[in-house]
Image (cartoon, rainbow, N blue to C red):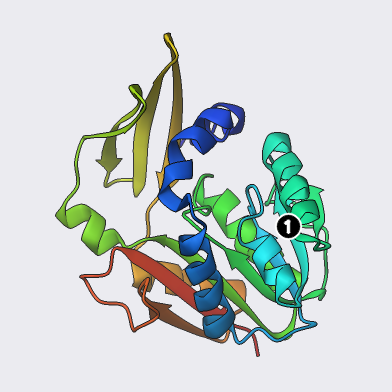
Amino acid sequence: MSEPVFDTEGLFDDDYLYFYAPRDAAGSLSDAETDLIWHLLGIEPGMAVLDLACGHGRIANRLAARGAQVTGLDVTPRFLELAHEDAAARGVDVEYVQRDMRELPWTARFDRVINWFTAFGYFDDAGNRRVLAGVTRALKPGGRLAIELNNYVAIMRSYLPTTVMERDGNLLVDRHHFDPLTGRNVAERTIVRDGSVRRTQYEVRMFTYPELRDWLLEAGFATVDGYGEDGEPLTPQHRRMIVVAKLE
């Protein structure tokens, strides 16, 4: 089986920020998600927290403002540059690391790890499991992990072969299909912005709750629970799935 297509520079860039920025222009969504993360993971001031695939630091910097000792890891230099700028503007100290999430360098360093907004599943199954193994190793005994991603049941119920985002006459168009033999959503993204057209491809693994739960148990976690975007136990009606795993 071939390695999934994952063009990080083509997928996560200034165009991505441009089209997704209106989603949380006032910051209220990020504030609410930070509240939820703090609650579900039982974070306390002074805890060491890793934001895995931290992007431009919208969650990491908010956690730091609440007193957590935060490290943010991402592979995209531009996102980390923006994360540093936002941290400075907020007057918080966050350690930002540019690195592939399959190559976590830490052992028993963190009390909590978060992986938010469908930032897991972009590699083949061996690579995705390698990420989980690295997280298990990086957590202290009793540590917890939260992964937030699409709720497979809800997505499949309303699956569309084409989705379009529009901003100021510019377009982000995803044409995709789901491969049931691999569990991957395979997509071609077309960006039409300021008179230019750019295309990139990507694939992301989609998980049912039982499948991801079993992966986490195999990675060494002792218990796994599933929630929706409101923090309540996961149902078919939830748009998002949050999986919280705990080490012994």
Dividing the picture into quadrants, the one containing residue 225 is bottom left
The x and y percentages for residue 30 are 52, 62
Quarter occupied by residue 10: top right
Where is residue 53 drawn, in percent x and y?
63, 52
Left or right: residue 18 compared with residue 221: left
Q: Residue furthest top?
A: 195
Residue 2 seen in render: no
* Residue drawn at x 35%, y 36% as measured from the top left: 186
Image coords of residue 238 (percent x, y)? 27, 69
Q: Which residue is mark 1?
A: 72
Count up the numbered dots.
Answer: 1
Residue at 51 percent of width and 29 percent of height: 15
Whole-percent x and y of residue 88?
80, 53
Q: Nearer the viewer, residue 37 or 119?
A: 37
Q: What residue do we see at 73% from left, 44% from top?
A: 80
Q: Is residue 89 above or below residue 163?
A: below
Image-based side of 36 in relation to 136, left or right: left
Question: Which quarter of the image is occupied by the C terminus?
Answer: bottom right
Q: Is residue 135 above or below residue 4?
A: below
**142 and 56: which one is in front?**
56
Q: Secondary structure at mark 1?
A: strand
Question: Is the residue 141 above or below the residue 13 in the image?
Answer: below
Other residues around mark 1 within 10 Å, as few (<14) / some (14–19) / many (≥20): many
Residue at figure coordinates x 76%, y 78% from the top left? 67
The quarter of the image holding the N terminus is: top left
Tag 1: amino acid: Gly
Q: 78 and 210: which one is in front?
A: 78
